[in-house]
Amino acid sequence: MRSDFAAVRLHLENAQQCLKGDDAASRKLRQALDLLVEVALTAEYTVPKGKVLIFPHRASAPR
């Protein structure tokens, strides 16, 4: 099951909007949330790698 990175990003962006203060703690939290939003965006748009199936090698029939 894949995580819903779009929903995670939305929640993080909403959290950023709640931090309207100009104090040091608010600024640090906004910066941290910025990084998390970028990670969520990367995860959201990264195509999952497929699995490679290895088929057994069939010996050729003698001629």
Image (tube, helix red, strand yellow):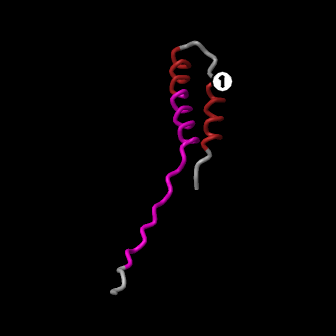
Q: Residue furthest top?
A: 22
Q: Position of residue 34 (x, y in %)?
A: 54, 27
| Residue at 57 percent of width and 41 percent of height | 45
Q: Position of residue 15 (x, y in %)?
A: 63, 29
Q: How many marks?
A: 1
The residue lying toward the viewer, choosing from 6 and 16, is 6
Residue 26: name its quadrant. Answer: top right
Is residue 42 highlighted in magenta? yes
Q: Residue furthest bottom?
A: 63
The residue lying toward the viewer, choosing from 8 and 55, is 55
Residue 21: name its quadrant. Answer: top right
The residue lying toward the viewer, choosing from 8 and 50, is 50
Q: Position of residue 4 (x, y in %)?
A: 62, 46
What segment is highlighted magenta in the picture? 33-58
Residue where numbered disc 1 is placed: 17
State the SS at label 1.
helix
**If the image is split into quadrants, where does the N terminus sit?**
bottom right
Q: Position of residue 22 (x, y in %)?
A: 58, 12
| Residue at 54 percent of width and 32 percent of height | 38
**If the image is split into quadrants, where does the C terminus sit?**
bottom left
Is residue 46 highlighted in magenta? yes
Q: Residue furthest front?
A: 63
| Residue at 50 percent of width and 21 percent of height | 28
Three-letter amino acid code at disc 1?
Gln
| Residue at 42 percent of width and 68 percent of height | 54
The residue lying toward the viewer, choosing from 29 and 50, is 50
- Label 1 Cα crowd, 10 Å radius (few <14 / some 14-19 / many 20+): few
Residue 43: name its quadrant. Answer: top right
